[in-house]
Image: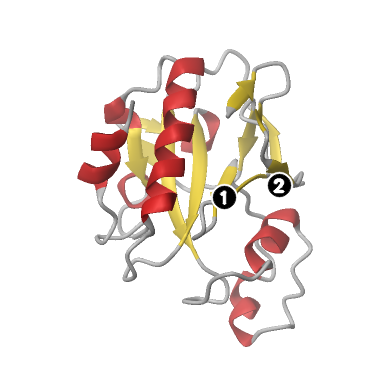
Amino acid sequence: MKINTATGLLESVQYLPSPHNDNRPEETRIDMVVVHGISLPPGEFGSNAISEFFCGTLDTRSHSAFADIATLRVSAHLFIRRDGEIIQFVPFTQRAWHAGVSSFQGKTHCNDFSIGIELEGTDEIPYEKIQYKQLSKVITLLMQTYPDITRDRIVGHCEIAPGRKTDPGLIFDWNYLKGILA
């Protein structure tokens, strides 16, 4: 695995371009990774619903749970499925729309300076070891490419949007992840 710095893409993974992104503010330094958890429909794994949601092609009439997200325009840079497959939706050089209203250490608008990585999962079901391994590989590459990303700037969505978001959940094993980072 390698990051192509010219394109902002992770080489050798599937790229499904999302329309839900835009330019980062000029002279923004990428200095944080935000880890998320998502499942669509909630609690179900393995469908293409998340990819379709991030690409703006989800048929929100296909499941009753999708009615609440019908008008949302959301994306992440990467999505890691339960089997470890990685899909990229937004180049790292662009601003993905993953954090929403957010702040970290006094800085607001975390989408501006962060990379969002979604893990297929829920707050209550343990994530798979292969997801942690893939996440660790990706974060290591990101830290090499964007040296302002440090271990203390790898955070959960719950940390940048407390009270509003709970993912990746209390079940997420931060000690294990940080222990396997290169």
User: Which residue matches tag 1?
Assistant: 79
Residue drawn at point x = 54 percent, y = 57 percent: 81
Compared to residue 160, the image places residue 122 above or below, namely below
Can you name the residue that lies furthest to the left here? 175
The three-letter amino acid code for the residue at tag 1 is: Phe
Front residue of this view, candidates 96 and 1: 1
* Badge nearest the viewer, 2 or 1: 1
Residue drawn at point x = 31 percent, y = 71 percent: 124
Q: x%, y% of residue 108?
A: 42, 35
The three-letter amino acid code for the residue at tag 2 is: His
Compared to residue 62, the image places residue 142 above or below, namely above
First reached walking from the N terminus: tag 2 or tag 1: 2
User: Which residue matches tag 2?
Assistant: 20
Compared to residue 124, the image places residue 56 above or below, namely above
Instruction: Residue 122: tell me if it is visible.
Output: yes
What crowding class fits label 1: few (fewer than 14 Cα within 10 Å), some (14-19), or many (20 or more)?
Answer: many
Q: x%, y% of residue 164?
A: 37, 59
Label 2 sits on a secondary structure element that is loop
